[in-house]
Amino acid sequence: MRSDHPAPPEPGGPGETARFVGWLGSLGCAAAGYGVFQFLFGVLPQSLGGEAARYLISGVSGIGTGVAAWLAAALVRARAAAGPDRLGIPAPRAAERLSPGPLPDVFASAYTTLVERLSVVDDPARGRLTGWSHSLSETGPVRPTSVGTAYGLHVVLDLGVPDGRLHPGDLVDTLWRLRLPDGGWSARSQGAEARPEVTALVLGALGRAGVSRERLAQEVDRCTAAFTHELDRAGRQSTHVVTTVLRGLLRAAPDAAVLSQLREALAEGSIGDARRDHLRCWGYRLDPPRGLPSSLHTAQAVVALDRAARVLGEDEAARAAREDAVRWLLTCPDGPHHQCRDLRNLHEEVRRPRTDDPSRHEVLNVRHFTASWVVRALMTPGAREVAAQDGLQEAWRERLDGAATAVWAGQSGGIWSWGVPDGGELRQPIWMTYQGLSALRAHAVWMYQPED
């Protein structure tokens, strides 16, 4: 991930010395010796043993200088012939220039796996469905889901389309076919009632794929109309749900009136952390009790607020909360930063009363790839501005590199696995692969340094 470019020679270092000696040798050995002879003969005092002594001292010094210049020039020529690496500058090698780093292979492997795991099912009610289920590790013919196909579409858009085996148009058509009868989308475990976090996820993917705003408008209206404290209190209290809806609608309907309301609710839901200089951050809830400070939910809030600031502008309250949260992420007291507690993956539940039986609850299990969110939060333009203003560039780079290292360590062949704590099977949620690839791609773009 890190570009290996030679540092410029330090003043007085091998490069400077080589240039000086080369210049001296270029004068010619005799010229250098004669110059020293003339200089010394002119400055030595007359009282120094007479004129003969002055000639002797000046002559010996001139001859010595000429010999030294000849030897030095010969040495420089010999070292130059041996290669620039002898001067402390790595010699460029054709093989190194032609050999890519490991990231292109990871992207290629991920694309191949997505092709292999692509599911095409003819549904009697919805027609041909092309996409993925929640997990890439599911075997046998599986029915594509809204969540799996939306994240798969995001991956395809990130990786590009090198061939026709994965066609974004097929995925877009499938997402429309998976729309619920009353509009909107839900996760497989949520049944036949649309949920705003899944609907916003799908709408964001469709908007990113180029679906017109006119076609998305009706679904946007349905999503926002149902996402109120009265109709979805659990969702409006959840940091994860609010940030997901905010991010999705910023892609699908950047002029939606509800966006400013969600941004305000998110900013007001921050908490102060006495363990980190009372800097503001986020827990898993936006309403009391908000829970303990969480790097995962803080990173999600930073990403959502930064994107909202680019689209909607930013008031003082939202800016102060976002900038404080960046500082909070940069003050992680644990280490090393590729294994610190701020990068631990989390699991949470979003519990909602069922509309058909309010005495029972619908439970959505949500797992979070924390390191990928920290990378995305620290890569936001606002985070980089805060680090520069506060003189925290070193801490920013250290935390960012640590989180990127943790993201990289979680993949095998471009696919990320979620380890089940009880030692059971290793699942491969497609959302985790999308988040891992997206984080590494953004980090690689940021770290790129062109050769001079």
Image (tube, rainbow, N blue to C red):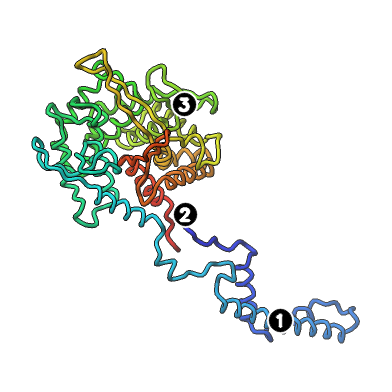
Identified at 59% across, 71% down, the residue is 86
Q: CA distance from mark 3 to mark 1?
A: 74 Å
Residue 197: which quarter of the image? Answer: top left
Q: Where does label 3 land, which residue? A: 293
Question: Between disc 3 and disc 1, whose residue precedes?
Answer: 1
Q: Where does label 1 land, which residue? A: 35
Identified at 87% across, 79% down, the residue is 46
The residue carrying pointer 2 sits among few (fewer than 14), some (14 to 19) or many (20 or more) residues within 10 Å by Cα, namely: few
Q: Secondary structure at mark 1?
A: helix
Query: Closer to the camera, 378 or 426?
Result: 426
Dot label at residue 376: none
Residue 451 position, x and y percent, is 44, 62
- Using the image, determine if residue 415 lies above or below residue 300: below
Q: How many marks?
A: 3
Q: CA distance from mark 3 to mark 2?
A: 31 Å
Question: Between disc 1 and disc 2, whose residue precedes?
Answer: 2
Q: Where does label 2 land, which residue? A: 2
Position of 76 with respect to 101 (left or right) is right
